Amino acid sequence: MAQNKRRGRKKHTPTISNTGFIGSVFIDTLELEKKSYYFSRKQLHIVHHVLDGLAQATSSLFAEHDVTAYLSCAYLHKQQKIGFVLSTKPFKEAEGVAYFKNYLIEKNFYNGNIEENYQEIFNTGFIGVVFADLSSIDRFNFEFEMNLLSKLMKDMIIPVKELFLRNKIPAYISTVELEEQHKLGFVLSVKPYDERAEADLYFEMYLRERGLYIGDEEEDIDKIVIRKKVEIL
């Protein structure tokens, strides 16, 4: 009697040529929905906190692999600017904000009293800022912030990576978003790679390896355990 083959999913075994990937940092957008708010506000409520959390995690992961790429996200509400502050040395939050203000002043983007707001900074590792101007936006709501978060991550991370590379820091970063997985984040590498072909693929494999990929649970029929006991009379 022919033995029935066990039904299962067809295994997909993609390959990644880049050996420089060191990990990923990401957020679960379903978790962010718990922070939803109903009334519009004059300033950001969520985006800057998420971006700074991802930036800090990115810095930590690069530092673990001896890559001196440090970044944070700063939000200057009165200036209506949000951006990533970049450095080749660790820095405190207050230093990042001060450098951001100084950068805007030096580039003639600062609104207000320049003499009172310019601060002396002793950290010599700062290499620049990548920022977005939010002055055209009057009010924010939760849905708008979620769309803005995705846009800022995708648009600002490219010049962030280029600025690090220009300063000979091998910090390769790509924004990845798997909508069906409700995951949005960055993949990090110490070597260049094909972003279109490998970034999302690596992110998917990263989630699978950690049991975080939705849909990888066993099918109910696969959970049935069949035990057979043979007795010789």
Image (tube, rainbow, N blue to C red):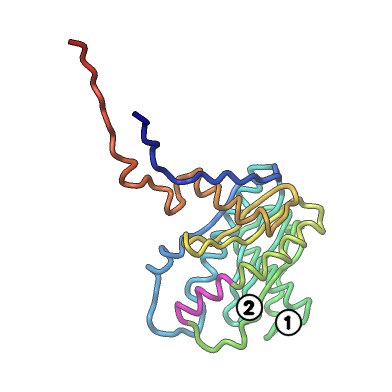
Residue with the mark numbered 2? 81
Look at 65% across and 64% down and name the residue there. 96
Q: Are marks 1 and 2 in contact (CB under 8 Å)?
A: yes
Q: Which mark is residue 7?
A: none
Give the camera-side residue of 222 and 85. Answer: 222
Local SS, label 2: strand
- Residue 142 lies, in percent from the top left, at 45, 77
Q: How many marks?
A: 2
Q: Which residues are magenta?
A: 141-150
Rate crowding at label 2 as few (under 14), some (14 to 19) or many (20 or more) other CA atoms within 10 Å.
Answer: some
- In this picture, is 13 found above or below 56? above
Residue with the mark numbered 1? 109
Give the camera-side residue of 15 and 35. Answer: 15
The amino acid type of the residue labelled 2 equals Lys
- Residue 113 lies, in percent from the top left, at 69, 84
- In this picture, is 162 found above or below 145? above
Q: Which image quadrant for residue 150? A: bottom right
Look at 51% across and 49% down and name the residue there. 207
- Residue 198 lies, in percent from the top left, at 66, 53
Q: Is residue 149 magenta?
A: yes
- Residue 157 lies, in percent from the top left, at 67, 64
Q: Is residue 185 magenta?
A: no
